């Protein structure tokens, strides 16, 4: 059986840091365990941080093996509550089969179709958008700015902000992504690849920015700080631009945090489990009623996982990026 | 009469950007106004920001004139509630006499002796320390780090933190200041002029830093981010190191804000007027009961104001720095 590993400890991720190796198939499940056939692997920017420090530093990651969120089908069960044929969400290795404790596999509501939606709009990405926006205390009439606006988190942030009566400005890379973001109902999307993002942002936000939902880093954060309003709130959700570097963050407008009495909050969705139910209910309603749009960009074949992962980190693709296994 | 002005719009403050010029003494007070004889001028780092942009951009600052907080004596009054001989706290020009609306002069409780304490421990500096610490929700057993620990804000922050059962670590410039800070009851003070501040900080904070009270900027913020704990709180009170520059902030450890789920809050004491009474009550009790120590470093003579101001910005002096007029 094939499985992805990291070849070496590395500060920057290149495709030759990955290898698809042959390993023995997993042993039969023990008591309380299930065997899973992988259907989808979720490509998430934050994983790159763990990939760089795989050497035993991330609890539960066996040295060298690449882990991620997957949607899988139970093919053998020695656990109560999970039956053959069930679809589950599980953190598992990037390989066609895994044997995991049932406690680390969550059964997916059969009404969720396709089940891959639990990796995006109806899973961590959607919940992160919902919870991060909620923590920022959005008020109708305010202006929200979100980076990586064509991604699975940013696209939901903007749509929820519009639904709450805010002006929503997105930042994305390239004309195609920006057109997509505007098609979702954002008031405007700015292409960070064009010159003078700060100037265009000032024009797009004539009343300044009240909430910045930050997924990327310096490229969007620094211009945002140049137009942030007094008592502005910055939800620091991700720093995708920087996971793969070790250079200092350089911010021309850092002083705005003081001068404008800004609050910046780094948050982790898992710290707000008490809000999951409310978040999921609204996201599911949004999908069912059609006002919450989402997209999946699917690459077929385990052998393309590393390449697709690095392409996503480099800014390619719209919506949720997934690997599908046959 | 002499008065300090700024010679020019300037990005960096040098002593020759200031001039002590002859002006006409102020006209007689009109209805509702008082004439004040300046006793003390407060030297505050944040003023440097307004000094650089004096050109009509700071409301109420007449072009070119330097303004600051002063303690003064009423020598002529055409206002109810203020009588000749009263001591007041007023924002006024750096000159021996000012005529101001009574509404901008606040009578000082005669029990406060010397009255200059309202410029430091019993005024904005002490209140800023109290309110900033309170906003950080300190808990006994936590570790607090404060920069500019020998200054009028930092010295109070550390003493209040000790009183609330925290471990208090100060950062200051030079052995003399550090000895002073430790004499106030801080557990330890680190000299930022010596090498490897980050390494010494890690040793001084074996359980990490829970609260950073930041008065300075990059020099202290970046090492603090290297040892901040999960759910750490950063109270951004001042950036004295940067008021006088226009270079980008460079932070090696910015990502800690995300990885540790840190909250950073830029705050302005004036936004928390509802806490003034409680703050002042504890600060006055501290001074009266002797557990809250403070120091004033007084320079005599208006003619030394610019030089003393720039020396303070450069890190000279302990406690509250004041100009005293004869």
Image (cartoon, coloured by chain):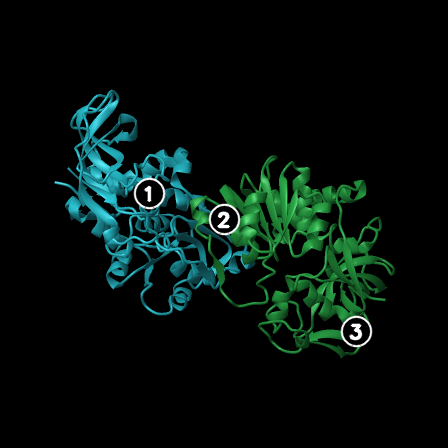
Chain colours: A green, B cyan
Front residue of A182/B160: it is A182
Front residue of B28/A69: it is B28
The residue at the far right in this view is: A85
For residue B94, which numbered disc appears in the image?
none
Instruction: Using the numbered discs, state the Cα–Cα distance from disc 2 to disc 1 in whole angstroms.
Output: 21 Å
Residue B76 located left or right of residue B170: left
Q: Which residue is mark 3?
A: A26
| Quarter of the figure that contains the C terminus of chain B | top left
Residue B320 located left or right of residue A174: left
* B124 in relation to B186, above or below: above
Image location of residue B104, percent across then percent down: 29, 30
Residue B318 in view of the camera: no
- Mark 2 vs mark 1, foreground winner is 1
For residue A226, which numbered disc appears in the image?
2
| Quarter of the figure that contains the N terminus of chain B | top left
- Mark 2 vs mark 3, foreground winner is 2
Disc 3: host chain: A
- Mark 3 vs mark 1, foreground winner is 1
Circle 2/circle 3 CB separation < 8 Å: no
How many residues crowd around disc 2 within 10 Å: few (fewer than 14), some, or many (20 or more)? many
Disc 2: host chain: A
Of helix, strand and loop, which one carries label 3? Answer: loop
How many residues crowd around disc 3 within 10 Å: few (fewer than 14), some, or many (20 or more)? few
Q: Residue at x 35, y 56 (%)?
A: B241
For residue B54, which numbered disc appears in the image?
1
Instruction: Using the numbered discs, state the Cα–Cα distance from disc 2 to disc 3 in whole angstroms.
Output: 53 Å
Circle 2/circle 1 CB separation < 8 Å: no
Of helix, strand and loop, which one carries label 2? Answer: helix
Asked whether the residues under marks 2 and 3 belong to the same chain, the reply is yes
Of helix, strand and loop, which one carries label 1? Answer: loop
């Amino acid at each position: 059986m094939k499985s992805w590993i990291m070849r070496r400890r590395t500060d920057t991720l290149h495709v030759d840091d990955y290898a698809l190796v042959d390993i023995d198939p997993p042993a039969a499940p023990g008591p309380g365990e299930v065997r899973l056939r992988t259907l989808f692997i979720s490509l998430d920017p934050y994983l790159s941080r763990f990939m760089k420090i795989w050497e035993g530093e991330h609890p539960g990651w066996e040295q060298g093996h690449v882990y991620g969120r997957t949607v899988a089908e139970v093919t053998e069960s020695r656990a109560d509550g999970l039956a053959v044929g069930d679809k589950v969400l599980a953190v598992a290795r990037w390989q066609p089969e895994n044997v995991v404790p049932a406690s680390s596999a969550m059964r997916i509501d059969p009404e969720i179709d396709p089940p891959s939606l639990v990796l995006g709009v109806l899973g961590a990405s959607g919940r992160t958008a919902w919870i991060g926006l909620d923590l920022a205390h959005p008020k109708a009439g305010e202006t929200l700015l979100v980076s990586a606006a064509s991604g699975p988190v940013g696209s939901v942030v903007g749509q929820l902000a519009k639904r709450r009566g805010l002006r929503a400005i997105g930042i994305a890379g390239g004309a195609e992504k920006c057109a997509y973001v505007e098609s979702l109902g954002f008031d405007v999307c700015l292409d960070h690849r064009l010159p003078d993002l700060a100037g265009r942002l000032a024009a797009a936000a004539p009343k300044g920015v009240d909430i910045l939902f930050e997924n990327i880093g310096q490229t969007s954060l620094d211009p945002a700080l140049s137009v942030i309003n007094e008592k502005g709130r910055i939800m620091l959700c991700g720093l995708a631009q920087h996971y793969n570097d070790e250079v200092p963050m350089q911010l021309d407008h850092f002083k705005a945090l003081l001068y404008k009495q800004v609050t910046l909050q780094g948050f982790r969705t898992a710290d707000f489990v008490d809000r999951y139910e409310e978040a999921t209910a609204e996201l599911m309603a949004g999908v069912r009623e059609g006002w919450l749009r989402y997209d999946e960009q699917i690459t077929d074949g385990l052998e393309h996982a590393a390449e697709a992962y690095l392409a996503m980190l480099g800014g390619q693709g719209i919506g949720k990026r997934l690997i599908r296994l046959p």
